[in-house]
Image (spheres, rainbow, N blue to C red):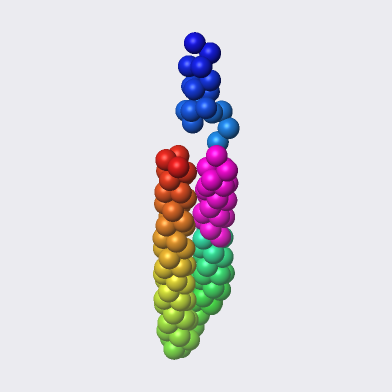
Amino acid sequence: MSQFIQALESRRLMSATPSPAMLAAIAKLETDIMKAQSDLTTFHTAVAATNATFLTAKAADLAAMKADLGSKDQTQLAADRLKLHEDIAAHTAGLKTDVAGWITTRHADIQALHADLLAIRQARGA
């Protein structure tokens, strides 16, 4: 009977300590999860900065347009309106850049997480 128990104790399923490969794979997964969360925070910060810049420019443009409303010369009002449209276009372009960068970063993060999960699967089987 003691020989049977000794045979069971050496089996991998009965082992309470994960293999070094498993520990390394889990540590890498945790690191990549934190990186993905950091990248998401960076994206949100970039969008907030783009929006803040636009809101400042929009407020200035609208104030200029309001000041020009009483004027008989509509050229300045038209120029202020054009400036507002240019600021809107710049804001849209800035957001598109932020999102494009985020898509690239997110794709890389997802690939890294998939590679980590594959390493964990392989460490289980090893």
- Write down the quadrant of residue 74 in the picture: bottom left
Residue under the image location 42 percent in, 57 percent down = 111
Which quadrant of the rendered structure holds the C terminus? top left
Q: Main secondary structure of the magenta part?
A: helix
Residue at image coords 46%, 56%: 112
In the rendered view, tell whether residue 124 sits above or below residue 106: above
- Which of the pair 105/1 is nearer the observer? 1
User: Where 85 falls versus 72 (above or below)?
Assistant: above
Q: x, y (%) of residue 36?
A: 51, 54
Residue 78 seen from this side: yes
The question of residue 78 being in magenta is answered with no
- Percent position (x, y) of residue 39? 53, 58
At which x and y percent is residue 64? 53, 77
Q: Which residue lies furthest to the top in this view?
A: 1
Q: What stretch is highlighted in magenta?
A: 19-42
Camera-side residue of 125 and 108: 125
What residue is at 42 percent from the left and 40 percent from the top? 125
Residue 30 visible to an observer of this rendering: no
When asked about the image quadrant of residue 41, the answer is: bottom right
Which one is nearer the viewer's eye here, 45 or 14?
Answer: 14
